Amino acid sequence: MSFKKFILKSSFRKKSKVIYQLSGLSIPILIILFFAISSQMNYNLKQKFAPDSDIQIIGDPNSHINESLMSEIREDNRVENVIGMFDYYPRNASGLVVLGVDSSDTDFMKMYLSSGRKFDNNEKEIVLSDYITDQLNKTVGDYISLENIDYKIVGIVKNPFYLGRSYTSLKNAQELSALQANESIDYNHGYVEEIFIKTKKGENNTKIVEDLKNKYNNRSDVDNGVMGPEESGENSRKYLEKMERIIFIVVPMVIGILLTLIIMMKSVGDRTREIGVLKAIGWKSKRIFTLILTETFILSIFSFILASIVAILVTFAMNLMNPYLPLGFFEFLETLSVSTFLEAFVVVIVMALVGSLVPAIRASRLSPAEAVREE
């Protein structure tokens, strides 16, 4: 029998032992994978549904921001894109928030269409959230009345983070808000509530925020100022991320190394006579050492596959129990990343090999005489 065949046969020779080893190795791997999958899912969902902005400017709730400010910001050669937004909160539809934005900027704002099409800026059209259409029993082609004006529903969006968020043109949202407050609107001098800024790749956003604050924070229409990454905030975020990694990756990894050490030490102890016989028939210490490490490597691969399946199913089941995150199974899989599993796999292999190092050294140093004496 070749060395490779012997290793494979030896690794899965006793079912009870294999189940015990796989279970022990899978527990820390499951914790690592569960954290990695959850983090990746949340990150990808935010990338899918959150506006693609680096910096925000929030206006005064009474006077709002004049749209001319966007033109000024666009002149900064460090800026890639500038988007203006205006929210309208209707009184006759609970939970509905209508976001006014130019139709061409809806991709930037991550308007995720599940059916229908985008609205036309020059028409009384609206794209409703699936949460609102379910509440009002509406669908594409129906109409909804806002401030006694009929708006045609031309699309439906899904967004698990903002359930009632719907979309219409900036002009429509401004008009609806003015009608609600019994105010007149000057279409030649429009206004927005928030400005989203996307900077060019490689630019120092902290410096841009500082410059924008110095330039615009004293404006009467910029009430809450410029919001974006600051040095203290970035350092705090990095520190929290580091702590999360220590808790959810390093700690399970240390536990996994200890479990691997215990499991493989027991395995070596149970096979003392076998190892002694192999030594007696001419196996070198190096080959015995390789045998134990390779067996651990193979068991770790199978434990990783088992833990991956369990982690995916458990995370998806938790997602199903969350009424605000109604993702189908294939949509859920789209939020995962192959790189996440590859990184976790590297951690698992390092964990397994480090944990099996001492048992492998012990087994390689065992002599035939010691094996007979211990048995």
Image (cartoon, rainbow, N blue to C red):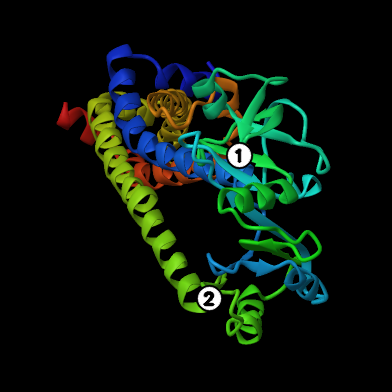
The quadrant holding residue 140 is: top right
Say which element carries label 2. Answer: loop
Mark 1 closeness class: few <14, some 14–19, many ≥20 residues within 10 Å:
some
- Residue that badge 2 annotates: 230
- Residue that badge 1 annotates: 147
The quadrant holding residue 271 is: top left
Residue that appears at 65% across and 80% down:
212
Q: Is residue 196 above or below residue 143?
A: below
Residue 128 circle label: none
- Amino acid on which disc 1 is placed: Glu
For the C terminus, the image quarter is: top left
Say which element carries label 1. Answer: loop
- Whether residue 360 sits left or right of residue 1 in the image: it is left
Q: Is residue 43 above or below residue 290?
A: below
Taking the image as drawn, is residue 285 in sight? no
Q: Position of residue 278 (x, y in %)?
A: 38, 27
Residue nearest the observer in this picture, 141 or 21: 141
Q: Position of residue 46 (x, y in %)?
A: 56, 46
Taking the image as drawn, is residue 170 in sight? yes
Residue nearest the observer in this picture, 345 or 96: 96
Residue nearest the observer in this picture, 165 or 178: 178
